[in-house]
Image (cartoon, rainbow, N blue to C red):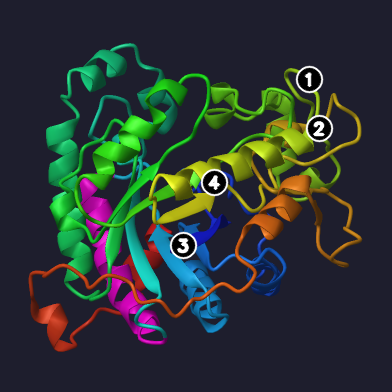
Amino acid sequence: MRWHGVVYDVGRKMTGWSANWRPDYSPALVRRELEIIRTDLGANAVRLAARDPRRLLDATAYALDLGLHVWAGPELWNATASRTAAYLEEVAPLMEKVRRRAPDRLVFVVGNELTFFLRGIVPGRTHAHRTRLKEVGPMIRAGRHQPPLRAALADLVKAVRHAYDGPITYASLPFEQPDWGLFDIVSVNHYRNARSAATYRAVLDRLRAYGKPVAVTELGFAACTDADNPEFLGSLNVSPLGMAAAVLPGVGRLVAPRVREVHERDEPRQARLLTGQLADLERWGVDGAFVMSFSFPLAPYSPDPRRDVDATALSIVRHLGRGRGRRFPGLPWEPKESFDALAEYFPPTPDPSRPLPAAAPAPRSRLDQGNHPNLGPRLRAKT
């Protein structure tokens, strides 16, 4: 497998005013965790995602300096296609400047599951509405989401190609059918569970038929006995009041959220499922895989099963809330058994020097002549 690594959140947010998924963010913490991903976990690649381009660019530059392949995705969730295109158009020249540090090791991820994360593909003003409206399911089964999705992706690719000359991809859902001719790598967020097991390999075979490198940009399991429960992919097992209190500045350090339903913790099962799926992907000829995810601070661990939100989280480290770990002193987490299983599974000497495929031809514009916009007030206002 050419790329093997993890998804690393540098600060995703559903909207500009909603809770940040990395409330523990600091540049020093991000850099230390990226070092651990490279050296202790043994990954040769990392998929970075963030709403704030400054966070993303800093993490991308440091990860490249460590020798990692980086798949970087600026994500302006719940915006319209036109607003997202403007956002990417301003980020692209900055990402191109970073790419020159390691031209063969950076992939630009132009979007993530946009049928639901972009406004306007299917009905619903918010992500929650779009995933719950009854009319959305029949619309998707009929394929009516495909034309607006393809049109939006064409605009986003054009916005990126104005200034970015490296490989690009899109983290798709299994039922989405983008025009993969626009992209250098075919990517899918593909979780294996009771709902998807019967068609899991068929999806990969269909994508491999395009003749391009194929990557699974998200896969993962929870750390409990029903680790492959598909419900864990769409919601956090925590009471709404406890979650609201936990994300408030200052209050979160004093409140331990309570779970909605107790699930028995089973870290060995998570580890077995992850390594088993990676072995299958490698056997089936998949070129890259990213485990979801490294950490998720919004789902803290507790020895009390009634408060162990981490048991149903997909992360490979358990966040300790107010505590500090022993294995990596000073950090707010401890590795799960899946961390060690992945460290043993990944090749002992990752080779980050293997070149990526050449980028597809791109439309040219004035931006290609060096007249690139800076990270100005308009972008800062959005993020």
Q: Which is nearer the N-term, disc 4 or disc 3?
A: 3
Q: Quadrant of the C terminus?
A: bottom left
Q: Look at 8% across and 69% down and name the residue there.
A: 363
Q: Which is nearer the N-term, disc 2 or disc 1?
A: 1
- Examine the image and state in which quarter residue 72 appears: bottom left
Q: Look at 25% across and 13% down and name the residue there.
A: 138
Give how far across and how far down residue 195 sits, in percent: 47, 19
The disc label shown at residue 279, or none:
4
**How many numbered badges does the structure rendering display?**
4
Marks 2 & 1, CB-CB < 8 Å contact: yes
* Mark 2 vs mark 1, CA separation in Å: 8 Å
Q: Which is nearer the N-term, disc 1 or disc 4?
A: 1
Asked if 6 appears above or below 135 in the picture, the reply is below
Asked if 371 appears above or below 275 in the picture, the reply is below
Give how far across and how far down residue 232 sits, in percent: 59, 28
- Examine the image and state in which quarter residue 261 appears: top right
Q: Which residue is mark 2?
A: 308
